[in-house]
Amino acid sequence: MKREHINYVVSLVVLILALLSAAWFFIIQPSPRHFLFHDVDYHAVSVACLDLMTQPRYKPLFDQYPSGDDPRLPAAIRDVKAFWLDVRPNEVTIWKTGGFHHMGLVFHRSTTVPNAYDLVFQEEGHPYDDILLYTLPSPKDANTALKPMATAP
């Protein structure tokens, strides 16, 4: 009888710990989507992406797929805590999550504003187009930010 009581208590403790862990994972911990829409400094990330694409010291990163905590990356990019990156001369992709449902930020030349670059949100498996988060003027005046044209869901 006493052994059954101990088994019951242990089972109850394990169940409570499992529920608390699930609550932390699904409720308390911010989702990657929330992080990308609310906690990222878009101007700093855009300037860092432009540096990655144009500064000679970052050329060794091209086509190398560095992890998000690679010390060679600018601090603004490391702060995103990306799963991995794809750095190319004409585009930087920062994947926050991987696997079958990846999401992240893509920085490339703007298709709507002349002499500017866009930072957009991409998410696999959603019918909507890329979501524009920020537009950065061309390098000659990159310290002056344009008004963001956000259309976040």
Image (tube, helix red, strand yellow):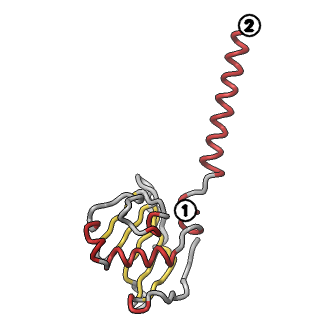
**Residue 149 image offset from top left, x and y in percent:** 54, 83
**Residue 93 image offset from top left, x and y in percent:** 38, 68
| Tag 1: amino acid | Arg
Element under label 2?
loop
Residue at the spot 68% in from the left edge and 28% down from the top edge: 13
Instruction: Name the N-terminal-most of marks 1 and 2.
Output: 2
- Residue closest to the far top: 1
Residue at the spot 49% in from the left edge and 71% down from the top edge: 128
Residue at the spot 31% in from the left edge and 79% down from the top edge: 54
* Nearer to us in this view, 58 or 41: 58
Q: Quadrant of the N terminus?
A: top right
User: Left or right: 6 with respect to 94?
Assistant: right
Look at the picture and state if 42 lies above or below 139: above
Provide the residue designation for mark 1. Answer: 33
Q: Circle 2: is it few (<14), some (14-19), or many (20+) Cα within 10 Å?
A: few
Residue 4: quadrant of the picture: top right
Residue 106: quadrant of the picture: bottom left
Say which mark, if any, is on residue 110. none
* Nearer to us in this view, 78 or 25: 78
| Tag 2: amino acid | Met
Q: Circle 1: is it few (<14), some (14-19), or many (20+) Cα within 10 Å?
A: some
Say which mark, if any, is on residue 1. 2
Element under label 1?
helix
* Nearer to us in this view, 139 or 98: 139
Look at the picture and state if 5 lies above or below 38: above
